[in-house]
Image: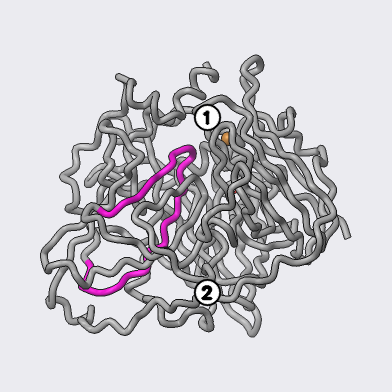
Amino acid sequence: GAAGGVALALPAERLVSAVVGTPPSVKPFTRALPIPPVLSPVHSDRSTDYYELSVRPGVAEILPGVPTEVITYNGSFPGPTIRARRGRSVKVAVTNRLQTPSAVHLHGGIVPQDSDGHPLDVIQPGNSRIYHYPNDQRAATLWYHDHAHHLEAEQIYKGLCGLYLVEDPAEAPTLPRGQFDIPLMFRDVALDDHGQLLWAMFDAQRRSTVLVNGVPQPVLRVRRRKYRLRLVNTSNERMFAFRLGNGAEFVQVATDGGLLARPVRRTEISLWPAERVEVVVDFAKARGGSQITLVNAQGTALENTEVMRFEVVDGIRKDMPDTDDSSVPQKLSVLPAVGAPVMTTRKVVLSFDFKNLVFLINGKPYDPHRTDFTIKRGSTEIWEVTNADPDPIPHSLHVHVVQFRVLDRDGRSVEPWEAFPKDTVSIASGETVRLLIRFDAPYTGVFPFHCHFVDHSSVAMMAQMRIVA
Ligand code: C2O
Ligand code: CU
């Protein structure tokens, strides 16, 4: 039942479980890390790049030589990467070739309501529509994913997500770029003994195979130099805590909404569903031939906690020069001022209704026809978000169409790497997190906010705000 299902989401429960998916019979760290293809525009004009995506069934090679049925954007698992440029707009024509409705949401995007992928604003099977993304926002690692009402958990799980990079050549141009700027999309899946995806809601316990860019335990051959890694957690419910096996540091340069003001050195990076963290890792001190493992310190012995490896190569490949002219500046960016005085403080309470087995926000299940908050465009608010559930049920909060500031967690101010700019925040059980949100997008209309454990949001842990002029 669903109550048991809640417990299944919890790491402690995974430890005591005897039931796990069949581990893949793959020799680890032999497959090269796949990089999702970069989508080319079908057409460009002075202001806009035009793309086409088709949402359709496909086949992925998650295990070598084994075809796995998935659902895809353009046949790719995960979907292709869209590279957008700040100030230049993108229009994506999406055709739905599934038997189910689909909606595309640009996570972290500041977009008009009719391009936001509201759960009821779906593309019916056989139909097409055009999404308009103005890219009038800071450079950032965004991602797009399915958002159809009640279906998003299953459809994201089966493959409906892809990267969307907003780039700004004026921002920190000395960071590693090109072939030294690597996306790493993490997600867990449950595979049966034929290598097919098992799908059930709240099935976190069986999702014991962690994929990086669609395959388990890949290896990336790196030169002895700095790399920029864009870590994206596309999992339904899995929380990661990444470390490098040799104890080396990550230098975090960006979070959900783009560059931090200054780089931050960290030895462990926590990454909850939908969060993004960009780090620079310097392999210059590693010996040629050495292997450095990316470890999920939050995994259990039953899982592939060694999620991938970096193999340091030395002076072999002509296309990967030895010189490293990249650097991490001490000042990465200037963050916008905190802004206008706060007129409104709201409470957002996240909880599970054990009687009716449904996740709630402020005591209510999601109603896509109800307005939960009415907000004045241009105003600044404080949201006090509480996870009212007993330990250890985690939740998070994602708010559409804004990048917010995390003020504090149970009254203690958060670390700079978590403060700003964020669109998704983790909230452990019993915690209260305060967010400062400026509703400065130029758009009005209805936009959702929800827990980004998508197995929770798919069963009602969602609400919505109406932004009015
Ligand atoms: Cu990434 Cu409404 O979600
Ligand atoms: Cu939740």
In the rendered image of this protein, does residue 191 appear above or below residue 465? above
Q: Label 1 CB, ligand 2: below 8 Å? A: yes
Label 1, residues with CA under 10 Å away: few <14, some 14-19, many ≥20: many
Picture residue at 75% right of the left edge, 56% below the top: 113
In the rendered image of this protein, does residue 18 appear above or below residue 209? above
Mark 1 is on which residue type?
Answer: Ile
Nearer to the camera, 382 or 368: 382
Look at the numbered disc 2 and give the secondary structure of its residue.
strand
Q: Which numbered disc, 2 or 1, marks the residue that appears first in the sequence?
A: 2
Where is residue 188 shown, x and y percent of the image? 38, 40
User: Is 224 colored magenta in this rendering?
Assistant: yes
Q: Select label 2 or label 1 by which is in front.
A: 1
CA distance separating discs 2 and 1: 36 Å
Look at the numbered disc 1 and give the secondary structure of its residue.
loop
Where is residue 301 shown, x and y percent of the image? 26, 32
Which residue position is annotated with label 1? Answer: 393
Picture residue at 62% right of the left edge, 34% below the top: 387
Marks 1 and 2: in contact by CB < 8 Å? no
Q: Can residue 201 be seen at all in this image of the molecule?
A: no
Span shown in magenta:
222-244
> Horizontal placement of 457 versus 217: left or right?
right
Which residue position is annotated with label 2? Answer: 167
Residue 85 is labelled as none
> Horizontal placement of 354 versus 303: left or right?
right
Picture residue at 64% right of the left edge, 74% below the top: 89
